[in-house]
Image (tube, rainbow, N blue to C red):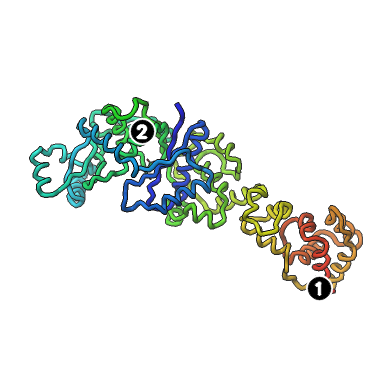
Amino acid sequence: MTTVTRFAPSPTGLLHVGNIRTALHNWMLAKKAGGRFVLRIDDTDAERSREDYVDAIRADLAWLGMEPDAEERQSARTAIYEDAFERLRQAGRVYRCYETAQELDLKRKVLLGRGLPPIYDRAGLSLTEADHVRFAAEGTAPHWRFALDPAEPIEWNDGIRGPQHFDPAQLSDPVVRRADGSWLYMLPSCIDDIEMSITDVLRGEDHVSNTAAQIQMFTALHAAGFGAARPLPRFAHEALLVGTEGKLSKRLGSLSGAALRESGIESDAVVALLARLGTSLPVEPIADRQTLVDTFDLSTFGRAPARFDEAELDRVNHGIVHQLPFVAVADRLPAGMDEAAWLAIRPNLEKVADAADWWRVVTGPIDLPVFDADTRAFLRQAEADLAWQDDAWAVWTGALKEATGRKGKALFLPLRRALTGQDSGPEMARLLPLLGEDTVRRRLLRAAGA
Ligand code: GLU
């Protein structure tokens, strides 16, 4: 059976690093198995869902190189939900309730006050037809709950958490449909997972108790004849992402794909970090997707929260930038900057955008420090002794060393300062040909005060 995974964001906000990580793991799971990765837009909440967020989600996935094999939208699938719901209704697996939010809150408080778990009392199940008629006459529409079967123990072998066991009697029957007819996330998600032949549901551990209820929904839907008879998907729940201070901070929550992109972080760095964060595999600046995909394995995932550290992302980013080929960055470099320049400057960059600063050093004009008389004399001699040729730097500095007795810093630093205005930077041997003979001679003479 072809592996099919899905990433199912609700378009009520931008994706943050935690969501991106879940998307990536689903993408990798599918790629490793030669399967399919589906983007499912969970937009049943018409009021909070926004089209610009859908666009942003697509843009983030495209930027990260995780383009889905298919895109589905829940808002376009309500006819399918009606059909499945009708089957559950006929099978007695959904029932009408009328409690207001305040009434439910009160019930919960009473139970908690008595030291009992706040489980819904299933009052809706014992309403008579006369009760329903009365509510209808009052103009009160019902919302619907899924009836969990207390006699059907819930078990699954979680791909990350291992064997899981839930007592259905300890769960509240989930609300699946609002009084206005709109859908809550739980049931449409199961219907879609069946209908789209999803084989693996990989998501955050905040969904563990949803999975417990959803397993009974899958079984009830199958029993009601909805969808082809197939095994349930495999479930895996990954530990949540936390910031360095140990919780999902505001900062982390607002670190969206767009924010990362704008900060100049490479998408390959985001992928390399998030692919392995929270696993026993080492986080390394691996630019090759196939390597990440080949080594992806749920059994390496830990149960402890994964710590996201922006400093670590920066480190991975440097490592990635230092490997980027010219073709990958050409359209982000200043006009005129060619491959030789990129290769010379690349090892000194933290971010690709910083290449412009070094390119300005090459093209000039640059500010020069003030040199003492001794250094000025040295620079004058350096200009005179320069023989422009291939490998000019090695030959030139070798000759200057012989002639002046200068070595190390005393030899190299004045040259670097005179030619770049900086104390450090890209290798001079690679910068020299970029500067060109005229510029080199001009800068030396200017520094020498000649
Ligand atoms: N829309 C749900 C969420 O964003 C989907 C969860 C899932 O089933 O993956 O939490």
- What element does badge 1 sit on? loop
- What element does badge 2 sit on? helix
Whether residue 209 is visible, yes or no, is: no
Residue at horizontal 51%, vertical 31%?
34
Viewer-nearest of discs 1 and 2:
2
Q: Nearer the viewer, residue 342 or 149?
A: 342
Label drawn at residue 372: 1
**Mark 1 vs mark 2: which is more N-terminal?**
2
* Disc 2 residue type (three-letter): Glu
Residue at horizontal 37%, vertical 26%?
231
Mark 2 lies on residue:
195
Q: Residue furthest right?
A: 403
* Disc 1 residue type (three-letter): Asp
Residue at horizontal 61%, vertical 55%?
351
Tally of marks = 2
The answer to whether 87 appears left or right of 292 in the picture is: left
**Which quadrant of the figure contains the N terminus?**
top left
- Is label 2 within 8 A of ligand 1 (CB to nearest ligand atom)? no
The answer to whether 168 appears left or right of 29 in the picture is: left
Label drawn at residue 407: none
Whether residue 328 is visible, yes or no, is: yes
The quarter of the picture where residue 361 lies is: bottom right
The quarter of the picture where residue 97 lies is: top left
The answer to whether 218 appears left or right of 199 in the picture is: left
**Residue 15: percent from left, percent from top:** 44, 50
